[in-house]
Image (spheres, grey):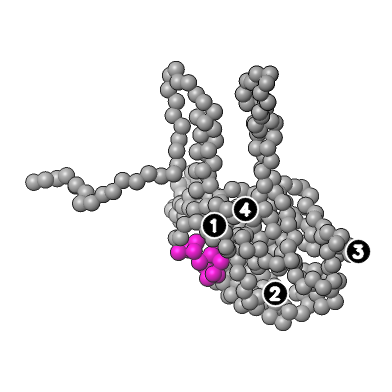
Amino acid sequence: MNNTNEPVGSTPGMSTLERARFGPGMLLQHEDLEQLNTYTRELSRLLFQSFFGCGVICGLVVEAVPECDKLKVSVRPGVALSCSGDPVYVPGPKPTDVFTKPSFNLTPARELWVVLCATTKCCAPRTTTCCSDDDEATSDCTREKDGFEIRLLTERPNCACACPIGDANTLAATTHQNNDNESECKCVTDFTCHEAHYAGICGCTCGECSGCDCKCILLARLEPDAAGKAWKADHSVRRFIRPVLMRDPKVEIEVKERAEQQQQPQPKSQQIPQPQGQALVHRLDEVRQERLRLQAEERRLQREQKQQEAAVAATGKGTPT
């Protein structure tokens, strides 16, 4: 009887990831050392892009305030992920301010788009080769520093990581409906912006450009009020990809074990005297009841607040109290 599990079909293939290997007495060139950096970067790009796609991870909240004939747009510190898998970091602690150009007429503008793009800067140049007196010395950078650029555009960019513009009333109603669930999970499951993620599709699309060429992330859409004096930021166009944290299963197991131990009878030497034990049990019951009451009150207030926000979003007037 043949116990071997021979494949009935196979085909070989190679990945694009390539690691550097060194041996004793080997003469190394700069390509060999650079491969250490290349492999690490390509691996992190592949993992980040496969796990999350692209979008805003945290922070990067946009605010707009008119100042004289210009518009001051502030972007709070945060982190985003480009479609190529590279992180874009806007450090703090203060927001980054950008102003519209003096030549730009703010009055007829109906909307502006705030875009965050990744940049790089060559630093610490150094001579790369030994040359004779007749040859010109060449230099190359020894450091490459990541940077960012915040752009204000009058039209929605064709090449940027973003979500499609949806109906604000539908978005608010769907969010309110999801938050009414008993678990109150904030997971996004039914928005078209994350449809490819839940379908298990690798990579991401950035409009008219490919994922490798996409270095920009759409942060918000700015629109003025009826009087044109105040500007409001609409963050529904950005793609938010912050991972959802889960409860620690070990803690749940330990809580269950402690509950089972409390139900078991204790030896006489470990039992608490009857009057003192009754007082402690009564106090614990009061604490538990108070905690349950506060949790129920908190859930009720959250539901009322979300109902008010949904009503305001549906009418488009006023602000929730």
Say what secondary structure mark 3 lies in: loop
Decide which of tag 1 and tag 3 comes sooner along the chain: 3
Tell me the crowding category of disc 3: few under 14, some 14 to 19, or many 20 or more residues within 10 angstroms, Cα based. few
* Image quadrant containing the C terminus: bottom right
Secondary structure beneath dot 1 equals loop
How far across and down, in percent of the image, does residue 146 sit? 66, 43
Residue depth check, mark 4 versus mark 1: number of the one nearer the observer: 1
Q: Are marks 4 and 2 in contact (CB under 8 Å)?
A: no
| In magenta stretch: residue 87 | no
Label 2 sits on what residue type? Glu
N-term-proximal mark, 1 vs 2: 1
Say whether disc 3 or disc 2 marks the residue closer to the N-terminus. 3
Check disc 1 and give the amino acid type.
Answer: Ser
Mark 1 lies on residue: 210
Q: Answer yes or no: do the residues labelled 1 and 2 have beta carbons within 8 Å?
A: no
Numbered disc in front, either 1 or 3: 1
**Which mark is first along the chain, 4 or 3?**
3
Describe residue 153's horizontal placement relative to residue 204 as left or right.
right
The disc label shown at residue 68, or none: 3
Q: In the rendered image, is residue 108 in sight?
A: yes
Label 1, residues with CA under 10 Å away: few <14, some 14-19, many ≥20: some
Residue at x 85%, y 76% (from the top left corner)? 227
Three-letter amino acid code at disc 3?
Cys
Q: Amino acid at mark 4?
A: Lys
State the residue at coordinates (56%, 72%).
Answer: 178
x and y percent of residue 4 in the render?
16, 44
* Disc 1 from disc 3: Cα separation: 40 Å
Residue that carries the numbered disc 4 in the rendered image: 215
As measured in the structure, the alpha-carbon distance from the residue carrying label 3 to the one carrying label 2 is: 32 Å
Residue extent of the magenta highlight: 187-199
